[in-house]
Amino acid sequence: MLDNTFVDMYAKCDDLEKAQLVFDELPIQDLVSWNSLISRYAQHGHNEGALKCFKQIGITFTCILKACGIDRGKQIHHEIIHMKCLNKHVELGNVLVDMYAKCGELEKTAGSV
């Protein structure tokens, strides 16, 4: 996505304010755009900005899982595991358990949350 390129370009040039503005206006903020912004904040020593973005991802995952069916929920669960968000966002585990329970799949996934 070209928009992700602009987020990364501004961030690489240490114009994190412009990168954040472009990011905020993205029609879809995918993992590429999130990771680009977080990594650039961290690379430029803006640790609070990086942590703020990471916290927003946890909130975003928490909100979206409440709207998911089992197929999309499993995909998001995979991304959560891949990004190691469960270690930092305990509430995600609760929301995952709730999503699997509502979909009648809790027994099948008991060890993965």
Image: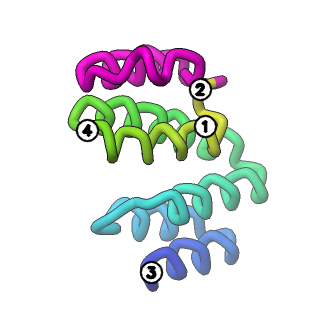
User: Which residue is at a point 47% across and 61% down the rendered structure image?
Assistant: 20
Q: Position of residue 49 (x, y in %)?
A: 60, 45
Q: Nearer the viewer, residue 73 or 42?
A: 73
Kindly state the secondary structure of the residue where label 1 is placed. helix
Front of the two marks 2 and 3: 2
Callout 2: 10 Å neighbours few (<14), some, many (20+)?
some
Q: Nearer the viewer, residue 85 or 43?
A: 85
How far, Cα to Cα, is label 4 from label 1? 17 Å
User: Which residue is at a point 69% across and 57% down the rendered structure image?
Assistant: 39
Q: Position of residue 48 (x, y in %)?
A: 64, 38
Give the mark nearest the N terminus, 3 or 4. Answer: 3
Amino acid type, label 2: Leu
Q: Label for residue 81?
A: 1
Q: Position of residue 112 (x, y in %)?
A: 58, 24
Q: Quadrant of the N terminus?
A: bottom left
Colour scheme in use: rainbow
- Pointer 4: what residue? 68
Amino acid type, label 3: Met
Question: Mark 1–mark 2 contact, CB under 8 Å?
Answer: yes
Is 81 a magenta residue? no
Magenta range: 87-113
Amino acid type, label 4: Cys
Amino acid type, label 1: Ile
- Pointer 3: what residue? 1
